[in-house]
Amino acid sequence: MKLPMSTELSLPQRFRRDTAAAHRQLDRLAILAPLRGIKLCPASYLRSLQALAAGHGALEAAVAQYPLDNPGCYRYRPRSQQLAADILALGGDSGAPPQSVFKLANEAECIGLLYVLEGSKLGSRYIHQLLTKQAPSLPRQFFAQCRDEQQDWQQFWALASSRLVHEGERQQAIDSAKRAFKRYIEQASALSLRLPA
C-alpha cells in the first residue's frame, strides 16, 4: 500500500513560491537587463549597479541594525562596499550610505530580509560568469564576492529553520521578504527615471 505524499511545502519552498512574482518582477526591470548580457556596455552596466545599490544598501543597513542573537555558524557577509567600489571604478557616484527604509520589529522580519540578500548571491555567481565571458574588463567585485554562496545559503536555511518554528513567524519572515523585493523594485525603478539612458 502506497503512503500518500505530503503536500506540505518545506520552508524554502514556501519562500520561493510566495516571493516568486516579486522576484520575477525585479529580474525583468529594464535597468537590470545588462546584467543578463542585454545591451551590455560600461554605461549601461554602471546604471545597473547604481540600481542595485539603491535597494541592496537599504537591506544591508536594516540587517546591520538588527543583529541576530547567537546565530550559530551563520554570519551574513555584507557586499555594499564592493558594490560601491565597482561603481566608483566606472566613474559613477556611489552616493551617501542609504538610510534604512525598514524598521524590523523582530527576528523573523530580519530573516526575511536575509532571504533576499543571501538569494542574491546565487544570482551573482551567474552574473559574474557572464561578465567574465562578455566583458572581462568591467569591474565586478560585487559579483565575485559570492564564491561561498552555496555554503552561506545552506547555513542561512539552517538558521531560518531553527528560528522560524511557528507559523506566525514563518509568515512574518515571508511577508518581510516580499516587502524587501517591493522596496528594491521601487528604488531601482525610481533611479532609472533619474539616470540618463
Image (cartoon, rainbow, N blue to C red):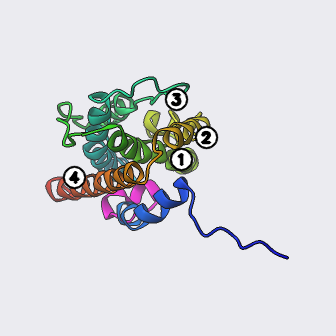
> What mark, if any, has residue 187 been given in the picture?
4
Question: Which residue is the site of mark 2?
Answer: 150
**Is 124 left or right of 25, judged from the image as shown?**
right
Question: Which residue is the site of mark 3?
Answer: 74
Q: Residues within 10 Å of mark 2 (few under 14, many from 20)?
A: some
Q: Amino acid at mark 3?
A: Tyr
> What mark, if any, has residue 122 been given in the picture?
1
On screen, residue 139 above or below 70: below
Q: Mark 2 or 4 closer to N-term?
A: 2
**Is any atom of residue 154 visible in this view?**
yes
Q: Residues within 10 Å of mark 3 (few under 14, many from 20)?
A: some
Whether tag 2 and tag 1 are in contact, CB under 8 A, the answer is yes
Helix, strand or loop for disc 1: helix
Q: Name the foreground residue: 46 vs 41.
A: 46
Helix, strand or loop for disc 4: helix
Q: Mark 4 or 3 closer to N-term?
A: 3
Q: Nearer the viewer, mark 2 or mark 3?
A: 3
Q: Amino acid at mark 1?
A: Leu
